[in-house]
Image: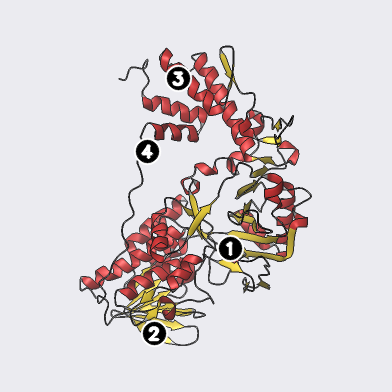
Amino acid sequence: MADLRTPTRRTVLQRLGQWGGAGLAFEALTALGLLASPPARAEPPRLPPDLGRGRSVVVIGAGLSGLCAGLLLARGGFDVAILEATGRAGGRSYSMRNGHSFAEEGGPRQRVDFVGEGAYFNAGAGRIPRNHGVVLDWCRRLGVALEPYIFMCESNLFQNDAFNGGQAVPLGQLRYSLYGALAELLDKAIRRQALDLPLPPGERDALRGLIARYGDLTRRGEAFVFEGSRRLGYSDPPGAGDAAGTLRPPIPLEQIVGSDAADLGLFSSMLLSWQNSLLEPVGGMDMIAAAFLRQDIPGGRQLRDIVQLNCPVAEIGQDADTAALRLADGRRMRVDFLVSTMAPTLFTPLAHGLPAELKADLDAIRFVAATKVGFETRSRFWEADDGIYGGISFLKEDISQVWYPSAGFGSPSGVLTAAYARGAPAERLAALPLGGRFEAALRGGEKLHPNRYRANMRLASAISVAWAQMPYFAGGWSYEDEATLATYDRLVKRLPWGRVYMAGDTFSHLPGWQEGALSAGELAARQIGERVAAGRR
């Protein structure tokens, strides 16, 4: 049995995590060298250039997964056609620009009306985490320029009608108030030997010093206490002369605990997919799809030359030798292999002869609703007035989040993601008429930026996308709950279905991410290549 009088690094780290939060434990793990770097990403499949000679493939869907699979197979000598039901490539990597028009199912046609040079709105995918090596590798290979995506600016705001009288507060003020309060509590416990495993005196003093720095505590006699800190920011900034500035006050721990901030942004930066550094393509998320389309393939062509837009599929079948398709325009095709990137629940009504268990599992994959609202602004008031340069503000409203642009700082205007809702809030927002969505976004924005938000929006620029209502889409992404993941694990064992392969982010452990989409596209191409190389029919 371990000596309880001499705690190990494990017990110290457990306590740091319990008292100081995951962030403090993460920093301690890193300092102790206990966090390994992520492994290097595997190379994409390199199919021999004549492997697929005499064999044909249809890829359904020109999102990133379909473009990736199509490019790899075409360069492997397969005769490839990519069929896209909508009028554009890119899928949910969708950047809207001035003059573009679109419509949800049963909804009015919306036209993008931006006046700023280079203005765009990322209606779908919005960022690339640093650990998404497949996306980053493809960006290098495709020559897609990247720039920082700012997820968290300490000036970003948190608002809840039931907290602070409904007045928004900077996330930094919340965060460092919490760190200070927790650090003070931990110092009190250490000083009074209230921990179940007291450290030796020298290590106890060192740990107290670490806690004091973590919370920016002030020594008062034998105790460290939290009396505020410049980390909280200034309500009135310092300047020259006698302008010492006015520090924002600490927010009491009991108010933070009851604020819902823990569920609305306060700890989001601890999630792996939100940790710095994050990136975005210069000019919009659709730059990756655009770069795919420019890639050379055999026959003196580019990938765009084998993409057929406005070409929905109406029926899918197969026999022992070929996969068969009937297109909505009546055309029929027979090919050696088929790669579908459709959402499973959109695929199964078209597929004839699916085994009952496979169909049941495909139909069980459920999608999360996701709804966005975008506005072009008359000024970048959030920078000038609030010191917000990029990042996200959070509200306990159905609009959920407001995203500020991470580029173009100091320019005359910008495009805000004025609402980004997921799940039930997204469903409620999507159920509103367009005017109701826009009004909800304006009301929420006013709570963050009173008396400035509405007046600074170009109302003619308002656009909204509810992905569950977009033609040929099932929603934002498939759920990641236990039931869905168990279904996915069964599907992996049951696929491919004869000559039909599945791709798209849904068929990965990263649903909703470009990383998942590209990984699944690579896998489908690799599986077909291995099948042909092995001489299997």
- State how far apart marks 4 and 3 are (Cα): 22 Å
What amino acid is found at the position of numbered circle 3 in the picture?
Ala
Element under label 4?
Answer: loop
Element under label 2?
Answer: strand
Q: Nearer the viewer, residue 497 or 272?
A: 272
Element under label 1?
Answer: loop
- State how far apart marks 2 and 1 are (Cα): 33 Å
Q: Is residue 3 left or right of residue 418?
A: left
Crowdedness near tag 1: few (<14), some (14–19) or many (≥20) residues, C-alpha within 10 Å? many
- State how far apart marks 1 and 4 are (Cα): 35 Å
**Numbered badge on residue 333:** 2
Q: Mark 4 or 3, which is nearer the eye? A: 3
Q: Is residue 249 left or right of residue 46?
A: right
Q: Nearer the viewer, residue 1 or 20?
A: 20
- State how far apart marks 2 and 4 are (Cα): 52 Å
Point out the tag, 2 or 1, that comes first from the N-terminus.
1
Q: Name which residue lies at 45% across and 76% down.
A: 350
Residue 333 against residue 160 in the figure, above or below: below
Q: Name which residue lies at 66% across and 70% down.
A: 112
What amino acid is found at the position of numbered circle 1 in the picture?
Ala
> Which residue is labeled 1 in the image?
123
Q: Name which residue lies at 45% across and 34% down.
A: 27
Extreme residue in the left direction: 535
Point out the tag, 4 or 3, that comes first from the N-terminus.
4
> Which residue is labeled 4 in the image?
35
Q: Check the picture and name the quadrant holding the N terminus.
A: top left
What amino acid is found at the position of numbered circle 2 in the picture?
Met
Crowdedness near tag 4: few (<14), some (14–19) or many (≥20) residues, C-alpha within 10 Å? few
